[in-house]
Amino acid sequence: MNHGPPIKPPPAYTTLLKWALPSGIRRESILGDLCEEFLNGVETGSRSEARRWYKRQALRIVIQHLFHRRLNGWQQNPIGRHQPRHGPIRGDPFLSTILADLRFAVRSFIRTPGFTTVAVLTIALGVGANSAIFSVVHSVLLRPLPYAESNRIVRPWAEKIFSRPMFLEFRDQTSSFSHSALFRGASLTVTEGDEPEVIGSGTVTAEYFGALGVSPLMGRTFLPEDQEPGAEPVVLLTHGFWKRRYGADPEIIGQTIGLDGQGVRSRTVIGVMPKTFRQYTGGQVWIPISMDPDDPNTNFLQYGYRLIARLAPGVTIEQSQADMSRLVATFPENHPTQFRPIRRSPIPVLSLHQSIVGDVKATLWLLLGAVGLVLLIACSNVANLLLARSGAREKEVAIRLALGADRKRVIRQLLTESTLLGFAGGATGVVAAVATMAMLVRRLPSQVPRTSDISIDAFVLAFAAGVSLLAGLVFGLAPAIRATRASPGMSLTDASRGTSFGRSRHQLNNVLVVAEVSLAMVLVIGAGLMLKSFTQLKHVDVGFHAERLVSLRPLPPRTRYADQEQWGQYYETVLERLRAVPGVDGATTANLLPMTNNNSGVPYLVEGQDIPDGSVSQVVNFRTVTADYFETMGIPMLQGRSFTDADRQDAPTVGIANETLVKLHWPDEDPIGKRILDSSGDLFATVIGVVQSIQQHQLDLAPKPQIYLPVTQAGYRSPFVIVNTSRDPNAILANVREAVRSVDATVPIIQVRTMNEVIDESLGSTRAYTSLFSAFAVLSLLLGAVGVYGVLSYTTSQRTREIGVRIALGASPKDVIRGTLRKGVAPVLTGIGIGTAMALGLTRLLTSLLFEVTTSDPIIFGGVAIVLAAMGFAASYIPALRAARVDPMVVLNDG
Amino acid sequence: MRPKAFLGEFEHMLLLSILQCREDAFGPKISRLLEERAGREVSRGALYATLDRLEQKGLLEWGIEAATSRRQGNRQRRFTVTPSGLRALTLSRTALMNLWQGLEETLSAQ
């Protein structure tokens, strides 16, 4: 027998049944029967089949109960089927009146197609945009990660990059974690088939999959033996790679595949991970990290790995932080040359979820807030439309009230109408959101994680339904109450006379316009600030002449390029061929491109100086470059000399510092000849020159200390090739690629781009956020304009008779226009005032997204105010003109 | 007065199943028998609604029995067909038999 936890039918459906059926022995016996039949099903068939059966039957019972029986009025009419099919419905009075109201509402909407279309589309815009952004927030921020007990997976000291010995100390000396593993990305070359293919891989230690709590689809994951020196090289495949490259071959386990990289040329497949497994290391395969203690790279400070762990049972995050802090406090004592005493406490342990979404959390909520404002504006617009409509229907309502209709009943009917409108708009919006989802996901900033998880699921639909319902009630309530407030007699006489009437309704109209304009003001100012910031960013001087540069990255396989000498020959030939291409003014190599997120850093000491107090260690970014790098890139040399052929392997190691490094360590001294040491105190490089600092990663970050090392001493590290051209870089791309290919056609070439494209990519996130905010701002402006126009043209049409009288009494068209404009523009100006105050408070939330723009930038605030005022003026002008053309004779003679 | 209507098909089958179950006419047993003999899945929504309707018509009644361990503590109902239920079945049966008379050849020709 099964001694595991008792098998239960799906609890959600049991709850649903309990909710739907009235309590008593009937409910009890039905619940019991279903449970019994479910267990029978589990024993005779599969559990999932039994669960499906249970859900299906539960739903049928609920539906039967809620609809069939209530509508047929079973309770009141025990004869059941024999009741007459025609005549008044004798079912539940609440449900049947709602049905009657709904039918009435549908009919009245069909009678006014123009109004209905505008209202539905307006709500669709609001709800659609909200559902789309909410599905992003839900999938990225709210939904738990797809791992077993994912809230127990943590990233201890997440900002720290670990070394292998540090990890071993961590693993052996902490007790808070049941599994812990290192991971990092690496690229490998698949050497099978016709075309070599470069793929990303995760290099991980054995417990990585245990920490995430996933088992392989077939085969096994890594064992500690796999990372020992001399172990057979193995590889684990993602489901996608297995399917794409090996056609989901069921016999793949145990086969050897040609996979070049990390020191070996082929690996044995030991397992395939399930399709549902989403990894955050990226890549298509996993390989184990070698744990060879004799490996020269196993320096305590040879960083490069990230740490992931699973909390041991019963351990809280706080306890694990204390554990971590205690361990890290021993580092300076055990490794005195590399660590200064650490003052920071406690050492943070973040949940994996936090570490993945941390950077984008605030921004995504901000986006949801912005799109929420759009919805509010849409709601005010529809409320305005409904107000106008309820004005037209005032007689109808008044007659119904006069004939003795219950006021609550009339309000309920009006609310049913607005709710129906809300749902119709919501449904349209959700359809639009589903249709545009893929486009939105593509446009999301690349820093947003988990985008492959984004989908519109039941939760998002429930959100959309909730928002639609709320919207329906919000924009329906005011008009409904308003329509039924007036005493029947007054309304009947007032409305029938058709003069300047219903003052308080106009006030309500104006309040809504003020609300719309002030909300739009907030959004447009937000977008304006971001646009200005984006423009500022684009004008940041990168420090080199990007517009002339083209780059690409050949990946010579280790099978034929085993040592630095062969690499050197390859790259020298490549550079030679490139210099011969017409239009190429220079060619060079660098291990990393500027303006990408990749970095290589190394801990260092400066001779005669201490590590600054309070820091664990200091790290300098380094780039290994060929001699003419600075000339090719257009980076000005400020002092000293560039590399020469004399800087060979056997000569003293040299380096060229950037200005930032010089200012940090030798602000008032001559930096030439100063010595930089590695973490064990040996010479790392003697400074022979100083160059101007360039932008390294993102345009909004200040340059960091950096040192350039010559390839002749530091070696090639699968570098990028960079070409300087006086022609159009786009036009020369193909020739450059061909020249590199001509050296060795079997070498894969990746990342062929102009430097401007690289810089553009670095702006991707900012651009994405800016364009999303701008889109919302444009939407809000449009909705605002429609709102102002709608209200004014409606009130003007109501005032036709009054205007006619005025004109008859001698008012000039100019007077009429001026008067009408004043009525239209006044609430807009009030809205601008309130909006400015709100924006002053709210734009502070944008601070982290802005670059060299204050959140109260007067130019943006002023500009937006002018734009909105102009919009208000334009929207008022057409109704004003129409008013001026009123023919007094026609108006006064008419009824 | 409207003449008393005959049983519906499902009502008819349900009452017969209850009789077939004899002393064991509990929900799950009735459903299983119905599904086995009728050869199709029975919607529990329709089942329980029809049981209620038959009860309202006075054609069946039920008594409460204690819960078993497989029912999460929920008590169960044992259904029995009332004398008027038996009468309704007989009436329906007679009517059907009358209508069937003389159709044997037509059917066997199929």
Image (tube, grey):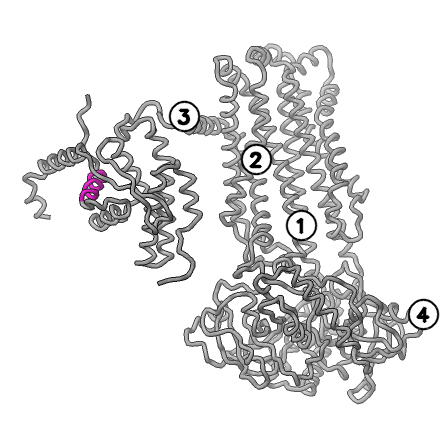
Within the magenta stretch, is there residue B4? no
Confirm whether residue A851 shows in the render: yes
- Amino acid identity at mark 2: Ala
Residue A471 tag number: 2
**Residue numbers of the magenta segment:** B10-19
The residue pinned by badge 3 equals A93
Cα separation, mark 3 vs mark 4, equals: 90 Å
What is the chain identity of the residue bearing mark 4? A
- Amino acid identity at mark 1: Ser
Which SS type dominates the magenta stretch? helix
The residue pinned by badge 1 equals A771
N-terminal label among 4 and 1: 4
Within the magenta stretch, is there residue B16? yes
| Secondary element at tag 3 | helix
| CA neighbours of label 3 inside 10 A, class few (<14), some (14 to 19), many (20+) | few
Q: Kindly indicate whether the residues beneath marks 3 and 1 are on one polypeptide chain.
A: yes
Cα separation, mark 1 vs mark 2, equals: 26 Å
The residue pinned by badge 4 equals A668
Residue A165 tag number: none
Disc 4 and disc 1 in contact, CB within 8 angstroms: no
N-terminal label among 3 and 2: 3
- Amino acid identity at mark 4: Asp
N-terminal label among 4 and 2: 2
Foreground tag (1 vs 2)? 2
